[in-house]
Structures are given as structure tokens and as C-alpha cells.
Amino acid sequence: LSEITLERECFNFFSSYIIIHIIQKPVFFNLILIVPFEMT
């Protein structure tokens, strides 16, 4: 259960993080998407 919660927190964090950076610098959109997948 804690693992699911952690994944959900990470998802919420990255979604807002990605949205903010899309608005600020769209160029980094792909970079931000790729990094979390490589960390897995």
C-alpha cells in the first residue's frame, strides 16, 4: 500500500512539474518525460 501511495505522490509531483515546465520551456518537455523512465 505504501508503494502505491509513493507512486501516486511521484505521479502527482511529476504531472505538476511537467505542466509547469511545458508552460515555461516546452523544449524540456521530452527531457522531463524521459528522465523518470530511466530512473525506474
Image (cartoon, rainbow, N blue to C red):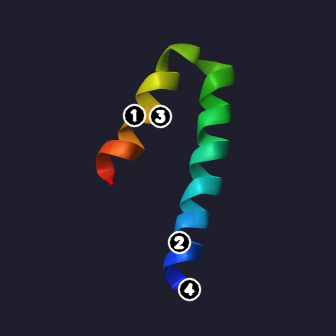
Counting residues from the N terminus, which is met first, the one under dot 3 or under dot 4?
4
Q: Is residue 32 above or below residue 39?
A: above
Question: Mark 2 or mark 4: which is in front?
Answer: 4
Residue lying furthest bottom: 1
At 49% from the left and 78% from the top, the residue drawn is 3
Please tell me in which quadrant of the rendered image residue 11 appears: bottom right
- Name the N-terminal-most of marks 2 and 3: 2
Q: Single out the residue that lies furthest toward the top.
A: 27
Answer with mark 4 or mark 1, whichever residue precedes in sequence. Answer: 4
Q: Which mark is residue 34?
A: 1
Marking on residue 1: 4
Q: Are marks 2 and 4 in contact (CB under 8 Å)?
A: no
Residue 1 placement (x, y as % from top left): 56, 85
Judging by the rendered image, the residue that carries numbered circle 3 is 33
Amino acid found under the numbered disc labelled 2: Leu
Label for residue 5?
none
In whole angstroms, how far apart are the C-alphas of marks 4 and 1?
26 Å
**Is the C-beta separation of discs 2 and 1 under 8 Å?**
no
- Residue 6 vs 28, above or below: the answer is below
Task: Give residue 27's position: percent from left, percent from top.
Answer: 50, 14
Is residue 14 depicted above or below 30 in this figure?
Answer: below
Q: Are marks 3 and 4 in contact (CB under 8 Å)?
A: no
Residues packed near mark 2 inside 10 Å, few (<14), some (14 to 19) or many (20 plus) = few
Name the amino acid type tagged 3.
Leu
Residue position for label 2: 6
For disc 3, the neighbor class at 10 Å (few under 14, some 14 to 19, many from 20) is few
Asked whether the beta carbons under mark 1 and mark 3 sit within 8 Å of each other, the answer is yes
